[in-house]
Image: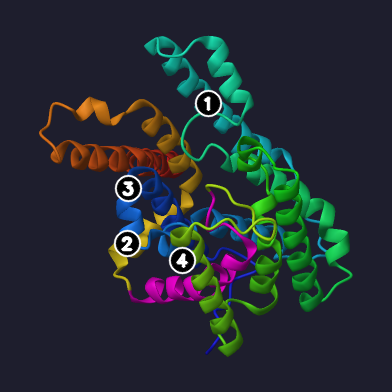
């Protein structure tokens, strides 16, 4: 099969398309009931959103080449990632305190553990990835892709064993990059080769699918080889499927979807971080109990529709209005 070539010199709309798919998957992760996720094999199509986001981060960090002087760690991360995230945490914390359900010291402790709100671990992972990608760049310059792949397989296995042996606390594991480091090697594959789906990658993708299904539904303790946590399908061996077969299927979807659906996903991808922060706030404030006035099961359906709408549409609407006003000002 032909490789999907990613644009390493400028804007690539397909990257935004992937991000749009991912951020909608994140919202669904936090709104779909667990039983429905299990019955729809959600872990195979919607559960890989964060790993895909991190692979895109690797791609953007290194797409100009490992010899590039491009800064991975910059003030942009502070302005674009950290400060908006802290503002979202303050909004969530203030609501919890004002509601009277949580004392200020408990909110502060929750903040120190990574923050409240669904998915609040992600910005911490993002920053750690940026630090890691900066530090390891000189090492990667010395290796070819096969050596990089082997290095990260060994490193990922060692991290799984170490976390198992030392019994890492789940709250610490939640905000560390240990379960995601193998994505650096797979991100390098995107840079060197594009998204390729040859016989070898199809085979490894099938292996990844088998392990995802096994971890998700068998729920067997396989320590110390694989750490046993609530993050069942987030092991290095699972990511082959996501990096190759799933990414290739997303490119197929990008090509065949109508213009309206494609534009919607592109816009969601372009503003994915804003949607992520808003969904943190929405899910922290809008509980299912607020819809108890509706007869079941329609109360859960109404909550589902409301939180999904409020997590996505306000961001897109605001950005559209802001863009139109900015364009008018430029024409004056």
> Which span of residues is magenta-colored?
231-256
Residue on which the image places disc 1: 89
C-alpha gap between disc 4 and disc 2 = 12 Å
For marks 4 and 2, the one nearer the N-term is 2
Q: Is residue 291 magenta?
A: no
Tell me the residue at 67%/59% (across/down).
58
Count of labels in the image: 4
Q: Residue 32's mark?
A: 3
Could you tell me if the residues under marks 3 and 2 are in contact, i.e. CB atoms within 8 Å? no
Considering the numbered disc 2 on the image, is that residue within a helix, a strand or a loop? Answer: loop
C-alpha gap between disc 3 and disc 4 = 19 Å
Q: In the figure, 235 relative to 117: above or below?
A: below
For marks 1 and 3, the one nearer the N-term is 3
Residue on which the image places disc 2: 40
Residue on which the image places disc 4: 213
Considering the numbered disc 1 on the image, is that residue within a helix, a strand or a loop? Answer: helix
């Amino acid at each position: 099969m032909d490789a999907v070539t990613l644009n390493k010199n400028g804007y690539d709309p397909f990257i935004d398309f992937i991000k749009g798919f991912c951020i909608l998957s994140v919202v669904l992760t936090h709104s779909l009931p667990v039983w429905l996720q299990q019955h729809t094999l959600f872990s195979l199509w919607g559960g890989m959103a964060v790993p895909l986001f991190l692979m895109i981060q690797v791609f953007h960090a290194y797409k100009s080449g490992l010899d590039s002087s491009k800064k991975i760690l910059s003030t942009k991360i502070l302005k674009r990632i950290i400060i908006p995230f802290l503002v979202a945490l303050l909004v969530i914390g203030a609501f919890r305190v004002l509601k009277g359900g949580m004392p200020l010291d408990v909110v502060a402790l929750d903040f120190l553990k990574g923050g409240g709100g669904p998915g609040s671990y992600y910005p911490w992972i993002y920053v750690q990835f940026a630090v890691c990608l900066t530090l390891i760049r000189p090492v990667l310059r010395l290796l070819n892709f096969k050596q990089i792949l082997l290095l990260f397989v060994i490193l990922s296995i060692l991290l799984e064993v170490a976390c198992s042996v030392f019994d890492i606390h789940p709250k610490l594991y939640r905000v560390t990059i240990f379960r995601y480091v193998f994505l650096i090697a797979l991100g390098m594959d995107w840079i060197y080769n594009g998204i390729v789906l040859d016989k070898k990658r199809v085979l490894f993708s099938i292996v990844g699918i088998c392990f995802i299904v096994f971890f998700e539904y068998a729920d067997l303790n396989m320590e110390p080889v694989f750490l046993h946590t609530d993050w069942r399908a987030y092991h290095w061996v699972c990511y082959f499927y996501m990096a190759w077969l799933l990414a290739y299927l997303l490119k197929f979807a990008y090509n065949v979807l109508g213009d309206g659906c494609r534009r919607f996903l592109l816009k969601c991808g372009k503003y994915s971080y804003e949607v992520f922060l808003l969904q943190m706030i929405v899910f922290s404030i809008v509980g299912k109990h607020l819809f108890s006035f509706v007869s079941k099961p329609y109360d859960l359906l109404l909550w589902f529709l409301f939180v999904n709408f409020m997590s996505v549409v306000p961001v897109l609407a605001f950005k559209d209005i802001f863009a139109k006003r900015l364009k008018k000002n430029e024409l004056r």
